[in-house]
Amino acid sequence: MIKRILLILALVLGVLGLTGYIFYSTSDQFGADLEHADLKAYANSTQFNGQQFINQIATPSVGGFIRGMEALYEFLINDAQTEPSRPLEILPVTRQELLSPSHEMRLVWFGHSTFLIQVQQMNILIDPMLTSTPAPHSMLAGGRYSQKLPINMADLPAIDAILLSHDHYDHLDYESIKKLDSKVGHYFVPLGVGLHLQHWGISPERITELDWWQTAQLGRSEFTLTPARHFSGRKFELRNKTLWGGWVVESQEQRVYFTGDSGYGPHFKAVSQRFGSLDLALIETGQYNERWPNIHMMPEQGVQAAIDAKAKVMMPVHWGAFTLSLHPWNEPPERAVAEAKRRGQAIVVPKIGEILQLSQTKQPSGWWRDY
């Protein structure tokens, strides 16, 4: 009897293992395989060492089997409120509102690190993760905090450009890209990320890959890829085979800076040295943990990054949609607002779906405390 049970268990595990291997090997979710020959195109980048992309300063790896098991154990025993007590209420945005002309830059936050920026009569979408699971499969991550988006993808107006910060699943989402592509004009991405898009059927003519500090122009606006302290990879064996970064979006009147995922480092001062003061900085301040302090900032570091970058106003992002770490879900804005007040840094925390105009920024209302 015991032998039969063990045999059945072994068969079940074998089937699960084979299914997982087939999915891992064949699913389009994982993007391009990034063969060595593909990476030769990036040999002239000072961020590429011949094998992989690297950070400006030493950034110890957070990987490894033992550390992974330790993190998994912490997730299992963690008693923090890592999700809201009920689904988040969001502010709906209509297509007509988005089509109404605006003479100044405005922004809509979709939660986490997804934004629609409207500038110079153009629609710019940053890191569109607009489905329910920030992982290659729904079994591998929890769902979105809100049951709806501010606006359905099908109802969005034409998107002039998508800007991507790096190829992790919570920033580059296969399903979102496939659903949005028919209304997207062009993609601006860090080096190597365009290979994923090409693998998904997007023509190279619609993709512009940039290195750190390179600038592209669309209409009367400019997009500059800025350094970040992070890593990349959609598969374990393809770690750091594509570049990561942030973005400065410039119109003739205003500048918005999105840090992308990043640990704290000297690159924030470098941004201010190159661009001067910034009207708004979208600062990564969520999904942090003491186990990975070099690749995600604590909220207090995020405030320091805003000060370094000379941001007139900062907004804490990379929270409000998914649980990818162990801290309470609403701790990022709470800590960031407290530190910003202490340091004299202006800060905004709009509700998801709220249309933010830079000339009409408000003091944080504390809406996240209601959950």
Image: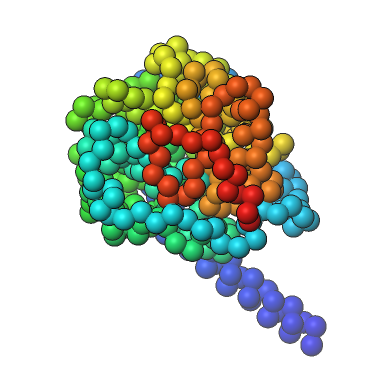
Residue at horizontal 36 percent and vertical 54 percent from the top: 93
- Residue 271 lies, in percent from the top left, at 45, 18
Residue at horizontal 79 percent and vertical 88 percent from the top: 1
Q: Give residue 67's quadrant in the image.
A: top right
Asked whether 357 or 46 is in front, the reply is 357
Check the image and report above or below for 168 versus 176.
Answer: above
Check the image and report above or below for 98 versus 6.
Answer: above
- Residue 178 lies, in percent from the top left, at 32, 56
Q: Answer with left or right where residue 123 lies relative to residue 332.
A: left
Number of numbered discs visible in the structure rendering: 0
Q: Give residue 248's quadrant in the image.
A: top left
Q: Answer with left or right where residue 321 lies relative to residue 12.
A: left
Q: Is residue 32 visible?
A: yes
Residue at horizontal 64 percent and vertical 49 percent from the top: 369
Check the image and report above or below for 55 versus 74.
Answer: above
- Residue 57 lies, in percent from the top left, at 58, 20
Residue at horizontal 74 percent and vertical 52 percent from the top: 80
